[in-house]
Amino acid sequence: MAVGIQISLNEKLYLKDPQETTLGKNIIKDSILLIEEIGFEAFTFKKLALKMSSTEASVYRYFENKHMLLLYLVCWYWEWVSFLIDMNTRNIMDPKERLKIIIHTLIFASKENPSIEYVNESVLHRLIISEGSKAYHIKSVDQENKEGFFKDYKALTAKVAGVISEINPDFPYPRALASNLFEMANNHIYFAQHLPRLTDVTVENEDFAEVEDMLEHFAFKILN
């Protein structure tokens, strides 16, 4: 069932907040579907407008270019994951249990409820896996970092790093472990689906259980 959740993002990511209008929500919805269908390289605002039965000019009223749109979607996703982690770990006192829930939420966020009607979380998850790193593996990353574009990802990393430090206060690399859990989750799902000789896990029919087991193994072996 869809619910009225609005994700708060850096206002510099957009020219007009797409979550505030029907057209903006359609831009989010159809851009997710189109990028997943044809890939980010082939994606253009002209093609998006055609899919929406709208105009390029209407899309440009919301986003300066397609890079900013991708960055918006990636930041939206990490804020969504952060929201789910807060919801799923509420009243869980044991930090080890919280970390297990965090790992599960990170991998299975696309299957969580509640959902948001204009975002297909399952498709967005696939987009993040295949295209997400293109939002920050770019030449302008330092300038965009100064603009605060990656604060959502950094805040999520800090949140998970805090749980890691609760489990083992002497562990010297909590942020590195936290960010590695995020990157490993996406990379090894991608490897399992497209480059299977680069991983030891299998993913079939979007069953990510082996990826979850692998992340738990790495995290708790290191922390113990």
Image: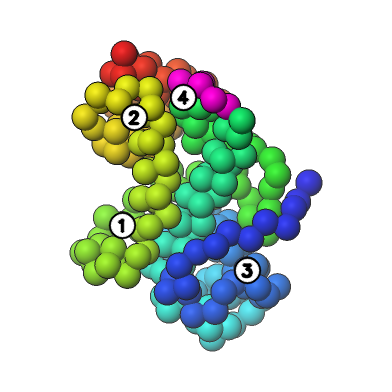
Residue at the image position 28 percent from the left and 63 percent from the top: 145
- In terms of sequence position, does the residue under pointer 3 or pointer 1 come before the other? 3
Q: CA distance from mark 4 to mark 1?
A: 30 Å
Q: CB under 8 Å between callouts 4 and 1? A: no
Q: Return the residue found at the far right.
A: 1
Q: Which residue does the numbered mark 1 point to in the structure image? A: 136
**Residue type highlighted by circle 2:** Ser
Q: CB under 8 Å between callouts 3 and 4? A: no
On residue 19, the disc is 3
**From what the image shows, is residue 62 above or below residue 201?**
below
On residue 95, the disc is 4
Q: Nearer the viewer, residue 31 or 171?
A: 171
Q: Is residue 85 left or right of residue 40?
A: right
- In this view of the protein, can residue 52 be seen by the observer? no
Give the magenta part as a residue range: 92-97
Mark 3 or mark 4: which is in front? 4
